[in-house]
Image (cartoon, rainbow, N blue to C red):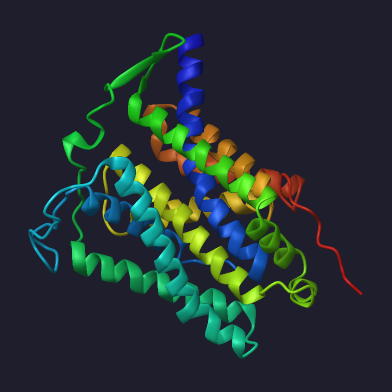
Amino acid sequence: MIDVLLQTLLNAAASGGVYALVALGYTLVFSVLGVINFAQGALFSIGGYLTYLLMGGRIGVNGALPGWGLPAGLPFWLALLLAAAGSGLVGLLVERVAFAPLRRRGAEPLLALITSLGAGVVLVNLLQLLMGAEGYAFPEAALAGLPNALVIGGARIRSVQVLLLAVCAFAVLVLTLWLERSKGGRALRAVAEDATTAQLLGINSEAMVRLAFVVSGALAGLGGGLVGVSVSLAGPYMGISYGLKGLAVLVLGGLGSVSGAIAGGLLMGLAEALVPSDASGWRDAVAFAILFAVLLLRPSGLLGRRPVDRV
């Protein structure tokens, strides 16, 4: 009984860690601009495919460049980091194309939300044009140095799940320390608190907005690479479902709350892990039912703050 419970908790933490990464990306952008970047799911997919290509994978017959691939594959760790960096740069491109022009014109936030949705659709379609619609499995040697499974407290856990949990936890820790202790992180939090005051104090608010998009995209790309090596790439639209889950986690934990995104991700992962395998089709329903129940009791989310009217 104990081993089954431990296995369930580890699986929940691994899934919840990925949801938390996506939700943290949403949180960073929402904190500085007050809008949701709906292109986050597309950046998740891009991270998965970039990791696949950098590790030596090749484009399938339905892609724009069938059979194309790098002459030699990179190790998983290096490919994952480079893919996250690439997704961050694409996130910056989304900010420059879909957000910055509207911000300069003082457009309503709703318009930025719609343009981000359009940018996400364009990115996914470009990905489908390049890679095709079929799924891709990572090379068998992707994690050659790891055993297939580990025995922890009597529970048999896939090594890739432990890897996924460890990388997510490390990424969240690094992000938290960066936000709390680095000059750039403190400047980003200052802009999130009050952009006008931060500008008067000498902080370049526009640079911080761009930084938020880069970090947000990198987090999404990191999650995409981890999920890809764990369960393979289901297709260019794989990131849409994770984007929706991340958005639900964002709301569940509290808009703009980093700790809330982490707590919400773990709760969402636990809710899914507790659904029996023979009722797996109900996992999304159970997870979102918990979201509705929490919001009915606490509309601001688990760790969200009630909005304060400034006068």
- Relative vertical location of residue 186 with respect to residue 206 in this rendering, above or below: above
**Residue closer to the observer: 83 or 94:** 83
The residue shown at (11%, 63%) is 62
**84 horizontally vs 290: left or right:** left
Q: Is residue 275 visible?
A: no
- Relative vertical location of residue 298 with respect to residue 88 in this rendering, above or below: above
The residue shown at (18%, 34%) is 141
**104 horizontally vs 63: left or right:** right
Instruction: Give residue 178's position: percent from left, percent from top.
Output: 61, 49
**Farthest right residue in view:** 311
**Residue closer to the observer: 182 or 281:** 182
The residue shown at (52%, 66%) is 213
Instruction: Give residue 188's position: percent from left, percent from top.
Output: 66, 62
Position of the C terminus by quadrant: bottom right
**Farthest bottom residue in view:** 105
All told, the count of numbered labels is 0
**124 horizontally vs 189: left or right:** left
Instruction: Give residue 177's position: percent from left, percent from top.
Output: 63, 45
